[in-house]
Amino acid sequence: STAFTTDVSITRPDPCLKLVNTTVKAQTTEDDFEICAIDDGLQIKNTTDARQDIFITGTGSIGLGGQNAPDGLVHIFGGTAGAVTASGNSDTLVVEDAGPGGISILTPDTVRGTLTFGSLSDNVGALVDWRYDEHTLRVGTSDTTGEIRFLTGNGVEAAGVDINNRFWWNDGLAFKGS
């Protein structure tokens, strides 16, 4: 059986469950769960191990894995990386871990796994992809005037490939293959 210890208010025409500083508890045969409406958001936690598994802020950001102050729209938290905050330029998805961390794109051997960068004008402006059976990693642009630039040091352009397929170095040397 499941016991609820809360005041439930359902009004028509919106049949939503309204939680105001309230906790709803659910119990399975192995785990206990709580859904809690707190001042700055909604949390869902497994009380068996005291983890806060999901947190949704009042502004709509989501923390997964115990992150109750997400650095971005979605923050997947495997452990603290220290006193670091995601850059505001790239915080739509934040993946943080106390040890080795990462993101995996897994596909069958005969198809490409791809990370694509797009915009309103071009939904495939640039990409990085891998195909196992071809043993090929590709990095490139799909824009007809797109260039690739390599940065070193503090974001300084050190080399690149221009729209004529010429490789260049920052000192002005340029080579074109046959």
Image: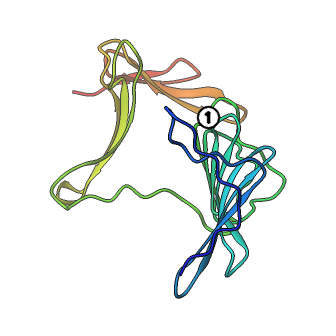
Residue 14 percent across, percent down from the top left: 51, 35
Residue ID at (62%, 75%): 3
Instruction: Give the labeled residue for mark 1.
Output: 90
Residue flagged by tag 1: what amino acid is it?
A: Ser
Residue 156 percent across, percent down from the top left: 66, 27
Residue 61 percent across, percent down from the top left: 64, 40
**Residue 145 or residue 115, whichever sits in front:** 115
In the displayed structure, 162 sits above or below 13; it is: above
Query: SS for tag 1?
Result: loop
**Residue 1 or residue 57, whichever sits in front:** 1
In the displayed structure, 99 sits above or below 172; it is: below
Would residue 136 be found to the left or right of residue 86 on screen? Answer: left
Would residue 82 be found to the left or right of residue 26 on screen? Answer: right
**Residue 25 or residue 6, whichever sits in front:** 6
Residue farthest to the bottom, as pictured: 29
In the displayed structure, 103 sits above or below 145; it is: below
Would residue 82 be found to the left or right of residue 65 on screen? Answer: right
Residue farthest to the right, as pictured: 83
In this picture the colour scheme is: rainbow
Residue 12 percent across, percent down from the top left: 52, 35
Residue farthest to the front, as pictured: 12
In the rendered image, the quadrant that contains the C terminus is top left
